[in-house]
Image (cartoon, helix red, strand yellow):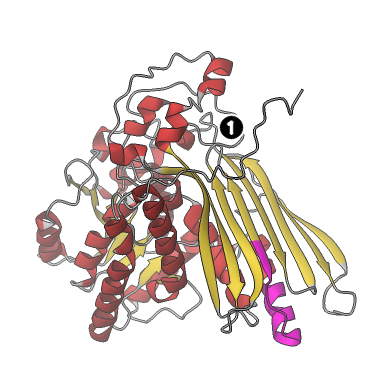
Amino acid sequence: MKSKSFNVVIVGGSGFWSESNHIPNLLALKKEISMLNVLAIRDPKNPYATSPVERPQLHKLLKTYKPKWLCPGEAKVDNLDDLSTLHEDYHIDLMILACNPVLHFEYALWALERNISIVCDKPLVVLANAASDMSAAADIIPRYNRLLEAYKKARAQTSYLSFSLLLRRRSLPAFSLIRERLKLVGDQYGAGVNHLNILSHNGIYKYPAEFRGRGAHDFSSGVGALSHTSYHYIDLFNWYLSAARGSIDFIVPRLTNITRAEDYLSSRGYESLRMLNKHPVADDVLLAPHVLACEIDFSFSFGFFRKDGRKIGDGNFINNHTSFSPRTREYHKGTTEPANYSDGGRTSHLYIDIHQSGTQNLQLIKNDIAFQPPEIQLRSRSHPMIKELEDAQVLFFEDAYNQTDHTLLDSLRVVIKSIIEKKAIRRGLVVDIREDLSNVTLFAKFYQLIAENYANKMIPDVQHAISLEGLYK
C-alpha cells in the first residue's frame, strides 16, 4: 500500500530537541505542504504516554498526524525490521535523526541503502564508549567514510537525495560576519589566522543519580560533553580557519585538560549548588565504569604549522560544563537532563577571540541563561589601512538566535521541497555530509586523545607543581 503522502519518520521524536525544533517546524510546514505526513516516531519512550504539559508540541503533532509509535527497545537500535516493513508498506521519504548520536550511524546507513533522505542532528557519527575505548574512538572516521560512500551510491540512483546536517551557527549574522571579515582580509592581503581561541561554558551541573538518565545527550553511552553542543564550536573552528588559512598546512591538537564524571562526582562538584538550594541528594549511586569515564570539562590546544615544520600560530578549544549555573531545580526521578528546563541552570557563555596576522582582531561574547533571549556582542579592531573595515567597532545582536535569514524551519522546507520537486539542493543552502569531513576529523581526533588519556591512566605532571599551601593568606 504505497502512500501518495510525503512521509517523515522521526527517530527520537519523544525527546526535548524534537519538541523544541523538529516538531514545531513540521507543524508549521503542514500549512504550506498539504501532502506532508509524519508517518511514525521511533523512540523508547511512547510519545502518546508523554505529558502534554511537558510536550505540548508533540501532542499537537500526535493529534494532527496520528503517527505510529515504533519502540526500538531500551535506547538501542536493535533490528530495524519494523522500519523496513513500514517503508515497504508506505514508503518513507525523509528520516529525521534526533536520537542519541551513538545510534546515528546505523539509522543513517539503513536509510541511505533505501534511498531515503536524512536530516541529522549533531554530531554526525560517534561510537559508544569513545571516551574510554581507543578502538571505538578510532572507528569514528571509518564509519563516516562508510556513510559517505553509501551517500554517493544513493545519489547516483537518486540525484535529489539529501543528507543534511544541522549546524545552525553558520546562519546567524553574529557568527557569519566573523567569517566574512576573515575571508575579506585573507583574500585581499594574504593574512591567515594565527591565533584562534574558543571558550564555551555551559553551566550544567548534575546530581549523582542524574547520570543514570537516558536521552539524546546523556552519559549512558560512554560519551559526554564533547558529543553535546561542542560540535557547533568545532564547526566554527574549522569554518573560520578555512576562511583565512594563510600558510597553515597542518594543525597539531593536544589534550591539555580533562575532568571526567568520576572526578566530578568524587570531588562532589555539585555540593555548592546543593547547599544553596537545600536539595536532598542521594550520593550512593552506582554508575558503570564507562559512564564514570565520560568527559565533562576538557580543553585542547593547537599548534599551527607550515609544511617545513615551522610553527606560525596556535589555538585553544575549551569546553566546561561546570561553569556558573543558576540551577534551582531539584532532582526528579526520570528527568534525563535537568538543563532542558528553565530552572535547570543551563547557560551559554561563549567567548571567541581571533587574530589574523596583525591585520585584525575579532571577539565574540555571549553570556546568557538558556530559555531567555540571547544577546551577542561582536567587537572588532582592524589595521587603519584596511579601508573596507572600521578601525574599531562594537556590534550588538539582540535575540541573536532569531535574527537570521535562514532558520531551521527554512532548512527543513528546502530539504522537503527539493525531494518533492526531485531537484538537488544547491550547495550552501544547507550543510550536507560531504562538507562535514573537517569537523568529523577534528572530532574523531579529540576522542582519540581523550580515550588515549584514559587508557594510559595519565595523571597531571607534578614535576613543576606549585603548592598553594601558605601562598594565599
Q: Name the residue tied to disc 1.
A: 325
Question: Which residue is painted at 38% across and 75% down in the image?
Answer: 418
Asked whether residue 132 is in view, the answer is yes
Position of residue 83 measured from the top left corner of the image (x, y, whole percent): 15, 57
The residues colored magenta run 180-196
Position of residue 280 measured from the top left corner of the image (x, y, whole percent): 44, 13
Q: With 156 as the anchor, is 374 left or right in this view? A: right
Question: Which residue is painted at 24% across and 70% down in the image?
Answer: 116
Q: Residue furthest right?
A: 384
Q: With 397 as the anchor, is 67 left or right in this view? A: left
Badge 1 local density, few (<14 within 10 Å), some, or many (20+)?
Answer: many
- The part of the image, by quadrant, that contains residue 311 is bottom right
Closer to the camera in the image, 176 or 160: 176
Q: With 187 as the anchor, is 232 left or right in this view? A: left
Closer to the camera in the image, 308 or 234: 308
Asked whether residue 7 is in view, the answer is no
171 in magenta: no
Q: Is residue 224 above or below residue 249?
A: above
**What quarter of the picture does the C terminus occupy?**
top right
Q: Is residue 268 above or below residue 85?
A: above
Q: Is residue 42 above or below residue 138?
A: above
Closer to the camera in the image, 231 or 413: 231
| SS class, disc 1 | loop
Position of residue 455 measured from the top left corner of the image (x, y, whole percent): 34, 50
**What quarter of the picture does the N terminus occupy?**
bottom left
Q: Amino acid at mark 1?
A: Ser
Question: Which residue is painted at 29% across and 81% down in the image?
Answer: 152
Position of residue 16 measured from the top left corner of the image (x, y, whole percent): 40, 42
